[in-house]
Amino acid sequence: MDNSHFDIAMNNRSQHTDSSADPFGPGNLDFGGSSDDFDFGAIDFNDPMLKDAFDFINRIADGETAPSLSNGSADMHSSMGAFQLGSMASGNSYDGGDMLGNPRFLSPSPLFLPDTDDTNDFLFPASDEAPLSTAANGEESSSSSTGELIDSSNQSTSNPANNAALPASFLLSSHVERNPLLPTQTVRVHPPKKTLTTAQAQTMNAAKAEKAKRAMLLKTDVIKLFDEHEEKIANLAKVHSVKPEYLKRLLTTASTLKRKRATGRIQALVHIKAQEENSTRPVGQKLKAPALRKLVDKDTELLEISKEKLEQAKREVDAQRLLSTRGARPNIASAGKDFGCTSRLIKNEFDSLHLRTGAVGFGVLAPGSGDDRGLPIWFVAGSNSVDFVRAHLNTTMWDLTGQLELWANTRKSGKPPTIPDLQSRSSNVIASGLRYILGNKSVGMNYVNYHRSIVGKYHVCLIGLPDLAIFKNANGPITPFLIKDQATLEALYTALEAGACHWARMSPDDIAEHNEWLKTQPVKERSVRSDKGQKRGRRTRGTESDDENESRESSRKRKRANKKGSSLQNSGRTTAKGRKTAAPKKSRVSKQLPPRSRETVDSDEDLDLDGDDGENDNEHDDDEDSENDDN
DNA sequence: TCGCGCGTGATACGAGGTGG
DNA sequence: CCACCTCGTATCACGCGCGA
């Protein structure tokens, strides 16, 4: 037998377990602990059955068609079917493909799917049915059972189906049961605890006291080191005439560059002078900036303007600039002209950037609706970018531009957004803006504890909220879903869309000030768990005491699960109220034990048959949404 | 009202220390 | 070197808070 594939597999495997690599990365072995402890030699690779199994996989990897499970190859079914299908269903990183170092087996390949429509039952047999590999160990295929593959006398490496320490129900859907070829750890059994003698207790106590003393000494030294560090920074700041905060910034990798230059004093004064001089002048005779600047220099009264008035003028300049850059064009003609000029500017910038830096990329621009003026345009940085579009998007730039224009002309438009629309959109902009500025995909907006959970924790704040009474909430911004007034919602959404209202990082001074303020605010304590003090043993699955466990279980959760189960049975992917349910996220679900029965898992969705992670599930949903929209 | 994420309470387990 | 103990951390289950 040619073992070349297998040798490669072993090499790959040793790379995977390299301690320098991420042991939990995709395609790596994960034994839930130190993977280096894993003894691969425990498997007898000279076992003829195992050799056949690897030979079979290598032949498939070489492109040979796999035999259908339902019409033959019973041996392969028992030895490899569970091996591969288990990995598909569980999504565990330690699957057949990984072990063999062959990525082709990582995807849910149809090669091993049976010739039956009832794939669910094949992958996830009902609790009252014998699971795949149980059947393999049972009477039906005893001649080719996986039990023959592994020496049952060696408990440390054999399938724990034979391990009496585990309850039989646990094995029904366990990873190890679905992957009977895996070397398996024994269940750890602790010896009964012995009571200490007086001398032992005294020794232990003395050692404990000594350890505490050493920990205290270390803590004292660390505090001392911190104080010395602060003192050195303060001295250095004094010597170089800079603020200690500046030195601390230099010590970190945080950027000190600001995104935008702040409005200056002279700009604010010119703005005031323009209001004085130009408000009464007709168009065409208004003074221009150089003339206004000269007038400012001569106006001694204006030059001694109060700080408050100057700040007010700066805010007005900022607002005016924002209106110029983000405000809607007043009519079709000006919008069309803006479109044409700006698109040419962008095209020029694309060309120039490519020539200056070699950057590649492409862009497509079309008027937002058929009523607007302006010709669709596409631009690329580097002619190679066209090849990219052709190769990876299977279209040409012209086609893409045409499709964009068509899409813009035919999409829903003209109707004013409804209140739920505005609520949802505003909420999305706020939440996505928060995720963007923090670079954290999982963070969520907290309106109720905004000052503590968002500002205090992440040091960012939402600035530029519309100056409306409803937003002057002591707890911070209120959730858009509580605003029922169309005009208020439109003001909020417009500010968010235009960028007038956005997330901003706080300066160190602001953070310190906010933290001081937080100290004066009452802390809302979390309620104490209602079951505090009670013993809550680990939940067991499928044991004979299930009824007792279920009776103890939270009635609320049971009600929810039952309701969900029944509604899902009836309506597939929607709840009883017709609301679409999101697929459970793998990151959390994968950590939990499977449900105890099919009672609460009656939909494909819950089973997560495709084995994708949560992100992909979302993508799938999005695709469906878009399809529905198209329909 | 539902579902998700966080935090809490509990257990399991491994590493390290200690004594025989 | 082994047995035993302590402690810290990982993991699990689930209640609470909160957004949608």
Image: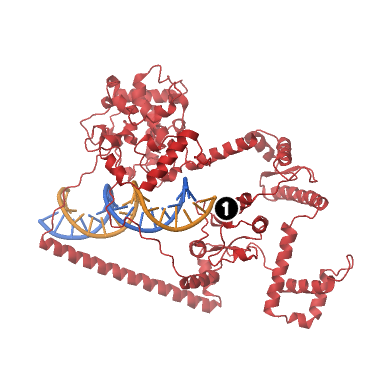
Chain colours: A red, B blue, C orange
Element type where label 1 sits in the image: helix
- Residue that mark 1 sits on: A432
**Residue A501, position in %: x, y?**
63, 60
Q: Quadrant of the C terminus of chain A?
A: top right
Pointer 1: residues within 10 angstroms few (<14), some, or many (20+)?
some
Residue A38 image position (x, y, % from top left): 30, 40
Residue A307, compared with residue A144, is above or below; it is: below
Q: Nearer the viewer, residue A235 or A444?
A: A444
**What kind of residue is marked 1?**
Ser
Position of A348 relative to A182 (above/below): below
Residue drawn at point x = 54 percent, y = 37 percent: A620
Question: Along the horizontal axis of the image, is A279 left or right of A464?
Answer: right
Q: Tell me if residue A278 can be seen.
A: yes
Residue A183 appearing in the image: no
Identity of the residue drawn at 52% across and 78% down: A239
- Left or right of A211: which side holds A373? right
